[in-house]
Amino acid sequence: LSEYEPLSPETLPHRLGGLPAVAEAVGGPPEAWRVAEVGDGNLNLVFIVEGSSGSVIVKQALPYVRLVGDSWPLPLKRAFFEYNALIRQEAVDPGIVPKVAYFDEDQALIVMERLSPHIILRGQTMAGRKVEELGRVMGRFCARTAFRCSDLSMDAGQKKADVALFSGNVELCDITENLVFTDPYFDAEMNRHTAPQLDGVVDELRADKALKIEAQHMKRAFTARAETLCHGDLHAGSIMVTGDSVRIIDPEFAFYGPMGFDIGMLIGNYLMAYHSMSAHIPDAEERAAYQEWLLEVTRETWVSFTDEFRRLWATERTGILYPVTLYEDQGHADAAEAARDELLAEIFADLLGFAGIEMHRRILGLAHVAEFDSIENEDLRAPLEERSLRLGRDLVLRRRQITDIDTVLAMARERETG
Ligand code: SR1
Ligand code: MG
């Protein structure tokens, strides 16, 4: 394989059949492989390849944004960043991402473990199904990547090399810079909110100068604060689950950014799911119980993040920041704890800002979430979206005053019940 060419179910067996890593994982003659293209995301081709002894996923970047078409070119190099993020995430949180079997930079393709019987989290939550340990695993992943890919823990030279490497993911960061942080706050060309019933609240948000200021403060943090390796697009479509297993996929938006970015986007997605539920679970009692579970996942995600972060702070602070030599070795362990708690408070304030902005862009921007978009009846959908829009605004604007996760849960409940 040399010059880039998109795969198809017809060409894949012939083109990948000769690769030992693929042939061994799939088994049997390539002509007998069953191949299906199953990509339903915004950007790439995704194939399931099944043979006599197993199956793999083949993910290949397209030279354009699949959601929009070839009028929006996008570099193939994103597969390189995804591959590099996957191997780092595996190193800092073993078992959390699919194992990579083969990577071809020219073809922009990654062959990886097929997670089975896992399905995308969004499908589970929309069906009102619970996932054991979701919050604990997600909080731990966010803490492990935040801590272990930062100057709190990494060798300084290696960290700088990684900052340089991921700084090449220019075009995918550009998508986030525009679609997430800017477009929702003015009448941008690609925006689409899907019900005229929202026009009033949309006008209000776009006239809100304080909100515009905060959104750009958050964007500045995104662009300037190269603290740690972020997944970059951690929403319910980037998580695969069974009833009791949680895995993370799709880090092609990986970049070096603020420690609160991934967990903030994730919590924004939990809260939108929470507000969408009256469309997905008709029975009031059942719905209320499930919504409380979603809030418990939200709480557990943050609690798990802080628990793991504190554990790593105590046991793995080997980097150039807040060194043990300056604190514990001088009898100033209490100062190290104070520094840690100040840092966690800063991460929490950022988390709230990123969560609120994610809630805005998923309702007002180009890329929406199925939790809301699948609700066909506008009169049902618009008020639910409005709850998330207003909660998002409150989170962004009050992010420095809110100091605990229970307040966030109370705010979500308050919006839900009016
Ligand atoms: C044009 S890409 C739109 C969105 O899809 C990805 O999943 C990211 O969330 C991006 O913002
Ligand atoms: Mg994705």
Image: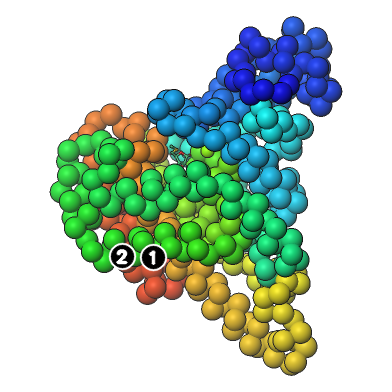
Residue at the spot 63% in from the left edge and 9% down from the top edge: 10
Residue at the spot 69% in from the left edge and 91% down from the top edge: 332
Horizontal and vertical percent position of residue 293: 47, 50
Q: Which residue is mark 2?
A: 213
Q: Is residue 271 left or right of residue 10?
A: left
Q: Is residue 303 left or right of residue 375?
A: right
Q: Is residue 260 left or right of residue 363?
A: right
- Answer with the quarter of the image where residue 116 lies: top right
Q: Mark 2 near ligand 1 (CB under 8 Å)?
A: no
Asked if labels 1 and 2 touch by Cβ distance under 8 angstroms, the answer is: yes
- Answer with the quarter of the image where residue 119 lies: top right
Snapshot colouring: rainbow
- Answer with the quarter of the image where residue 102 lies: top right
Asked whether the viewer can see residue 114, the reply is no
Q: Which residue is mark 1?
A: 217
What amino acid type should be assigned to the residue bearing mark 1? His
